[in-house]
Structure formats: structure tokens, C-alpha cells
Image (cartoon, coloured by chain):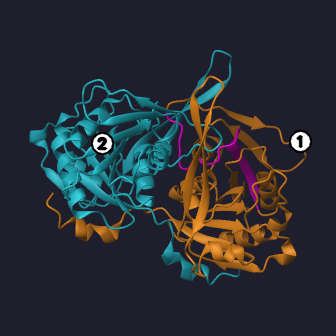
Chain colours: A cyan, B orange
Amino acid sequence: MSKKRPLILVTNDDGINAPGIRTLIEVMNTLGDVCVVAPDSPQSGMGHAITINDALYCNSIKVINGEPHTEHSCSGTPVDCVKIAVNEILKRKPDLCVSGINHGSNSSINVIYSGTMSAAVEAGTLGIPSIGFSLLDYSLEADFKPSKKFIKLITEQVLKNGLPKGVVLNVNIPKLDASEIKGIKVCRQANAHWEEKFDKRTNPLGRDYYWLTGEFVNEDKGEDTDEWALHNGFVSVVPVQFDLNAHHAMKELNTWDL
Amino acid sequence: MSKKRPLILVTNDDGINAPGIRTLIEVMNTLGDVCVVAPDSPQSGMGHAITINDALYCNSIKVINGEPHTEHSCSGTPVDCVKIAVNEILKRKPDLCVSGINHGSNSSINVIYSGTMSAAVEAGTLGIPSIGFSLLDYSLEADFKPSKKFIKLITEQVLKNGLPKGVVLNVNIPKLDASEIKGIKVCRQANAHWEEKFDKRTNPLGRDYYWLTGEFVNEDKGEDTDEWALHNGFVSVVPVQFDLNAHHAMKELNTWDL
């Protein structure tokens, strides 16, 4: 780690008042100079959405508990928060962006829908080393304390080693006491999917509406996956990339009659 | 193409009333049995967002011009439209999903923010061959007619050849007369980025707000890119994949002290 304290951008998708981000701020305050720019409302499932057709509001929040960091809430999505932090709020490009701690798993296919991970990916596209953290507990009463030492350890390693260009980390933490967590595993994401069910209801005016629900189905039994690690008491670390080119498909497409 | 008419799901992100989707429906009606499930309002820049904390409304729309397809508007995001189409509206899994025609480019990095392409990717995750179409003209007055023959040709090839597993197509069409378009090129996405600028204003109540604006900067001069093709009068076809595992980074991460 360089001798200068790193500048760390903290964001999330559960909103600036969610308990998870408080724990993340606490850990990051031990590692660098922290600036928080997070959504003013819950933004779960927002994926890589940006606000195009609306104005964004950004409020500087007075930090009252004497902690050294600064805080800003933003009316946009997690990706908006990263963009406005880097372009308007911060005086220089941050050395690190961390997102979370998400209330609930972002393992496997969930990355694609996750506002937490999309914020990390957005920072990655800007060349900022970046990590998304999630705890496998959706509850607002979740205990984030056991996560702290793992978050600190992984963040220290990223600050020390950097990350390969175009790679961000997706860290998921099992819902266990610190003493029960067996360690940290570098994994690939499990090849799992959601079997969606729409819960159909009728509103008081007689109009049908739907709630998206579903069951997470993992048919990938690989012991090198995040799902395996999490079910076996490990913190999972998945390196995530965002080169969407299907290079391997070019040759086949070039045989088509186009 | 099989003798049975294929079942084609049509969606977009500009909303069910946008002119672009009308052209797409027209072309698809010549190729198969069409079901339209599209957002009831503009959803540009929604990326892979899904609606978690809200109910979804879905309305069957009476098609009055005698065309054979069915239409449904949905209160959610483009990805919600695909999910509810496949799980609630369609009796069987569609043979193809097409999204667009988007009003404006989805070349290069834009894929990551694009509701049009995220709908195509969502269908891809469900194992449905899928194509996103965009015209490089943001105007609601855009002329979509020149796009028709290219959309038909590319769609026929996908119906005939299928697509490799885990690959969807991102098709962009230059804003030119049909006679000026030189042909179709299979490309990789240019390694370009947005230089964001936030336009800061003050509302009548004295509160500051921001509009996200920016400049698209392409430093990738490769002649194998979508940007090159589009600037040189070609329709670009980029195969897009959604395996977010950074397999190449595993080895390095495994050397860390975790």
C-alpha cells in the first residue's frame, strides 16, 4: 500500500441509510480517506441503469458522529452515483471504489441485475479498482459485524496488488458468525438461473397486477463456484469482467450470408 | 428456417408507442407469429434493471390495423417485459426475441446501459436466440424504412443458423438511405467511452440539480470495430456475450494472501 492514504469512494444500492453501507464506511475509514456517494432511496435490481430523462439531485450530508468521511446522497441509480462522484464531487479520481454491503446475495447470475455490482463495474469502466460486497442476509436487522475482517483483508489486498485491467471483484459473505467462516475462496460464478413466477393479484379497482417472484435454481455442482463456496462456509471472491464481445462467435458469424 | 412459423417476441426500450418498434413489428410479421410485449413508457438507459419493489401492470392492446400480431404494454423495464412475456403471456418459449428498433446508437460501451440490448441479453440468458436493433438517429421523426431489408436479412440468418449458446446480436444501422448503405459487417465493439459532464442548474426553489450529459470518445481506430463500420456506411453486427467471469484473472488472484 502506498504511504499516501488512498481516496476511497463508497456507494451501494440499498440506499445511504441502509445498515450495510454503515459497516462498509467503518471499515474503509481505517484504510483511507472516504467519500460516500450513495442513492437516497433503495435501488435494488437497478442493474446498470442510468438516469437520462430526469434531473439528479445531490445533497451533502453532515456527518454527525465525528467520523472523518464525507457523505452525499443522490437521487439517481448506483451507476449515477459513481458518475456524479467522479465527475462532480471528488477532486481527483479515487484509488478505489467499494459498493455495499448489499443486503442479500449477489452470487452467480445475480450480478447482472445487481445495482451494487453495477456500481462497481461502472467504476471499473473508469479504470478505478473496484469491489462489490454482499452479505447473504436480506434482513435490515442483518449482523454485518462478522463481515468486517474479511472486507478489510480483501480491500487491503486490492490496494496492495491492484486489479487486472477490466476486472472488478464480486465478494459474497455467508450468513455465519465470524468463527464459523472457514476462509476466502477465489471462484467462478455458478451457472445458475432464476425460475420466475409472477404472483398475479387484483387491485381494489379490479385491475390485475403482478409481483415478480422466483426460485433460484443452481444446477452447477462445480466446487470452484461461488455457490459452492458460500454453502460450504467460505467467503466467495469472483473476478468479474465487462468485455461483452463474444470474440469466439466472430468466425461462425462470418460464414453467414450477410 | 423450419416449416412451422417461428414464434417471435418483440420488445424495445423506447416504449410501445415509439415509431422504431412499429417498423420492427412490420418486418417480423413477414417472418413469423409475433407477440409484442413492450414498456408502456420510455425506458432508455435502464440497463438490466428489473422491478423488485413495485407491482407490474400489463395490458393487452387491441391491434386495430388488422395486423396479425398481439400486443401487450407493461409498466416495467425492458427486462421485466421479457420475463413476463416468457412466464405469463406466451404459451411457449419463443423461437426468437428481437428488441428495438432503438432510436439512437447502441454501439460500443453503450450496450452496458442500453435497455434495448439488456432485453436481448435477458432473452439470451433464457436460451432464446435474440437480436437488438438500433438506428443511429435519436429523432422520433427518424426514417426507419431503410433499416427494413437489413433487419429482415439478419433475422432470417439467425432463424436459419441459430446463434451460439450464450451469444446475442447487437445490430446498429447507420442513418443513411438504403442505397447508401454498403452492406453488413460482423465487428467487435469499439473500445470507446463517455466523457461525462454534469450540467448543473438551480430549480425555482433554489435547489441545485444536475443533468447527465457527455461526449462519446472513441480512441479505438480498429477497422474491425462497430464504430468503424458505422462511420463507413455499414450495418454493424456485434456478437455479445454475458459470461461475466474474468476467467483470466483467477490465477493472479489465487496468488494473493487471502
User: Image check: A168 left or right of B65?
Assistant: left
Identify the amino acid type marked 2. Answer: Val
Q: Quadrant of the C terminus of chain A?
A: bottom right
At mark 2, the secondary structure is strand
Residue A103 falls in which quadrant of the image? top left
Q: Residue under circle 2?
A: A34
In front: label 2 or label 1: 2
The rendered magenta stretch, by its main secondary structure, is classed as loop
Give coordinates of residue B105: x percent, y percent.
68, 61
* Foreground pick, A145 / A158: A158
User: Image check: B160 left or right of B145?
Assistant: left
Residue A178 falls in which quadrant of the image? top left
* Foreground pick, B157 / B13: B13
Magenta range: B32-52
User: Image check: A168 left or right of B58?
Assistant: left
The magenta stretch spans residue B36:
yes
The magenta stretch spans residue B253:
no
